[in-house]
Amino acid sequence: MQRLPPLTAIVALPFLFLFLSSTTHAFNITRILAQHPDFSTFNHYLTATHLASEINRRRTITVLALDNASMSSLLSKHLTLSTLKNVLSLHVLVDYFGAKKLHQLTGGTTLTASMFQSTGAAVGTSGYVNITNLKGGKVGFGSEDNDGTLNAFYVKSVAEESYNISILQISQALSSAEAEAPTPGPSQLNLTALITKQGCKAFADLLRASKAGSIFQESIDGGLTVFCPTDKVINGFLPKYKNLTEAQKVSLLLYHGIPVYQSLQTLKSSNGVVNTLATDGSNKYDFNIQDEGKDVTLETKVNTATITSTLLDQEPLIVFTIDKVLLPRELFKGVVETPAESPKPANKKKKKAADAPLSDDSEADAPSDSDDQKAADDSGVSGLDGGRLVTVVISLLVGILVLC
């Protein structure tokens, strides 16, 4: 008689399949294309423009691949590497389209975003691609800023992994005046001008008026991640900002930059403490990145901000918007790491030092350590911290249950 597997094994199988399915989304575009010599030039420029690493970080993607002949025609335009990146990013769709799906489009046509659109480099909707199922099984592709002209057509499926990655060959490069417009290289990018256009004018104005602006600009070539508080957030913070010394203002602004390119997916997978542009020796100026599932938060010792959107993604530069100004513990009152001082008379005024840490308004009305201790004494639990108190309560409950 055949023995049945243990019950625990049966119960564990669904979880095993779930785990495996959650880890199979990872792929390597250059490794896949390396198996197809006809796309060697296309593969080379995906790496040269850093698009390959951006593609690999995605969970769902469709690559409209160009063979060597089509790439030769594109390269004959003598585009700069930065401009070529825009053109190729137009050929990377941020949705899954397998060969079967192309012929089953609802209404026979669809408009989908490309990576060119998602980077924020495209003006308006020029980074969208029109896909239309034509008569006779023919499928056409055209960029939204090309007057609706379908100038490229589906040739064949190169590789597919359902709902994760699809590589489809198209007949020629998509035409887009917007994507082919001259684009400055990383060192020529003007950070403050870019974020001003994208809705972070208030933060850009602070950078322009500070030495921090030039430090941000000089850091782009080596990789830079910027966390930009929205205009509304900055305007509400200005009264505090004006009370800072010039040196403190520089440190605060630099605290909103990480000297390395970090995509949202990378931030989610790299939980932990990170250094910032303000980090200097004993002046840590670091914060903690936490993946909260749906959101990614930046936790200082004073407050916690949430990433609300990707404002600009053009490797080696990426800019996120956040819902709060990041407050470093070096400048603002945060978690007390040293024993609290003895309570002082309420009517005694504190001295104001120019470079002393400022108190955050959100912390101003919080009870002090001495107030907490007084409340504990009044409740008859003096000398018990939170952990010990919980232990005592649990022990009492267990004792009652045993007696019952």
Image (cartoon, grey):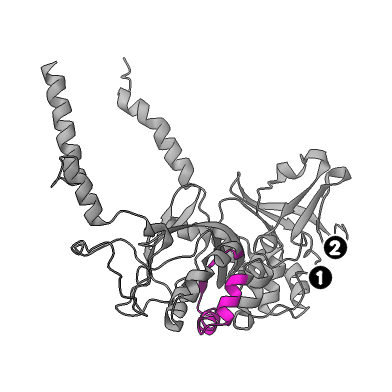
* Residue where numbered disc 2 is placed: 146
* Residue where numbered disc 1 is placed: 177
State whether residue 224 is above or below residue 100. Answer: below
* Lateral position of residue 326 relative to residue 308, left or right: left
Q: Quadrant of residue 56?
A: bottom right
Measured as percent of width and height from the top left, residue 183 is found at: 70, 77
Circles 2 and 1, Cβ within 8 Å, touching? The answer is yes
Say if residue 29 shows up in the picture: no
Q: At x 24% / y 56%, what residue is drawn?
A: 369
Taking the magenta stretch, the answer to whether it contains residue 182 is no
Q: Secondary structure at mark 2?
A: loop
* Lateral position of residue 25 relative to residue 94, left or right: left
Q: Secondary structure at mark 1?
A: loop
Which stretch did the figure color magenta? 202-231
Measured as percent of width and height from the top left, residue 229 is found at: 55, 65
Q: At x 28% / y 64%, what residue is drawn?
A: 347
Q: Quadrant of residue 70?
A: bottom right
Mark 2 residue crowding within 10 angstroms, few (<14) / some (14–19) / many (20+): some
Amino acid type at circle 2 is Asn
Mark 1 residue crowding within 10 angstroms, few (<14) / some (14–19) / many (20+): few
First in sequence, mark 2 or 1: give its number: 2
Q: At x 82% / y 42%, what residue is drawn?
A: 108
Callout count:
2
Viewer-closest of 340 and 26: 340
Label 2 to label 1, Cα distance in Å? 8 Å
Measured as percent of width and height from the top left, residue 65 is found at: 69, 60
